[in-house]
Image (tube, helix red, strand yellow):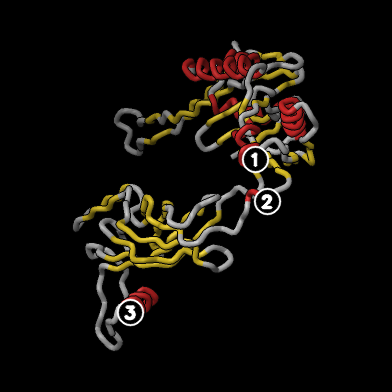
Amino acid sequence: MRIFSLIVSACAALLLAAEASASVKLKDLVEVEGVRGNDLVGYGLVVGLDGTGDGLRNIPYTEEALSSLLERLGVNVQGEEFRPKNVAAVLVTATLPPFARAGSRIDVTVSAIGDATNLTGGMLVMTPLNAADGMIYAVAQGPVLVSGFSAEGEAASVTEGVPTAATIPNGARVERELSFDFTEMESLRFTLRAPDFTTAARIETAINSQFDKPIALMIDSASVDVAIDSRFRSPAHMISEVENIEVNPAQKARIVIDQRSGTIVLGSEVRISSVAVAQGNLSIRIREVPGVSQPNPFSRNGETIVVPRTDISVDDAADQRVALIEENLTLADLVDGLNALGVSPREMIDILKAIKSAGALHAELVLQ
């Protein structure tokens, strides 16, 4: 508990110290409209597995895809008893990055969709990757890399990671480029990753100060429009200068609580009004101490009987303390006050919920 208190107090001190001087480059706060990736997906086959592939009798679409592939290669397997165990049907996914050019390579992820148990040692056969418009933008092929493993015997088995999912670094080659001409843009729109009116206004002010003229205009809490300055040869040259402008972003007062692990993360903007907190320390102990009743000596009709006895004790600690939290308390003061009560992290979660319910906690409480 003492170590937890020191860690939280140290983090609080660091947050408060950095609050006044923290500045972030614009590239870490915003996205440029039009500069984004596009999701790709394809259906393919992984071959060369060591008997851990799909059972073709149970997964008929794997057999159909394999037969179609072999027919395209000039091999006719129609009507044949062709049921190998070294083939698995997979879904292949990837992200086409912005400004990807034909011939460049991207990473892909391979995931089994049948009853294959392990993709280790497999090879992904040529798989077209389609975007949402149905067009093929890349083709994937190559040996799959599995991070997990699975082993079993007659009476026991062990599985580490997910052996039915794998990756292929640089496993897809881009075949089609996106039809997006960056040089034709007349203005730039920056979209905030965390929408906030104050941060958007600071971005507008910082850009206008950098260029000494009002070229930036805040549209709403999530977007800022910037007119392209004529002194730059292209919008890309202007972005390279604008994205390095430093801005001090505003932070929302927020407390994030993970109830499963007992983790609490408090933002530096958290404030609390005057409130008193008492940490209960009432314990009730119930113990059964049965007794034995013996008959008198030489008694003819006597009988030994077990007599139930219950011992109940109530312990209401006399050293229970009440903490008074003053107006506009800072994060460091809040942590110190709760630690003074000797509360555990899970008890601290209950206290924060109660303070929020009382209306004294001026912060967004996020429960996970």
Tell me the element at label 1: loop
Q: Residue at x 49, y 26 (%)?
A: 311
The residues tagged by marks 1 and 3 sit, at their Cα atoms, a distance apart of 55 Å
User: What is the count of numbered marks?
Assistant: 3
On residue 184, which mark appears?
2
Identity of the residue furthest to the left in this view: 154
In the rendered view, tell whether residue 102 sits above or below residue 325: below
The residues tagged by marks 1 and 2 sit, at their Cα atoms, a distance apart of 12 Å
| Badge nearest the viewer, 2 or 3 | 2
Q: Quadrant of residue 289?
A: top left
Q: Residue at x 68, y 42 (%)?
A: 191
Query: Sequence-wise, which precedes: disc 1 or disc 2?
Result: 2
Front residue of 87 and 318: 87
Left or right side of 348 for 288: left
- The kind of residue on which mark 3 rests is Ser
| Badge nearest the viewer, 1 or 3 | 1
- The kind of residue on which mark 2 rests is Glu
Front residue of 101 and 364: 101
On residue 67, which mark appears?
3
Q: Judge the density around disc 3: few (<14), some (14-19), many (≥20) Cα neighbours within 10 Å.
A: some
Q: Image quadrant for the C terminus?
A: top right
- The kind of residue on which mark 1 rests is Arg
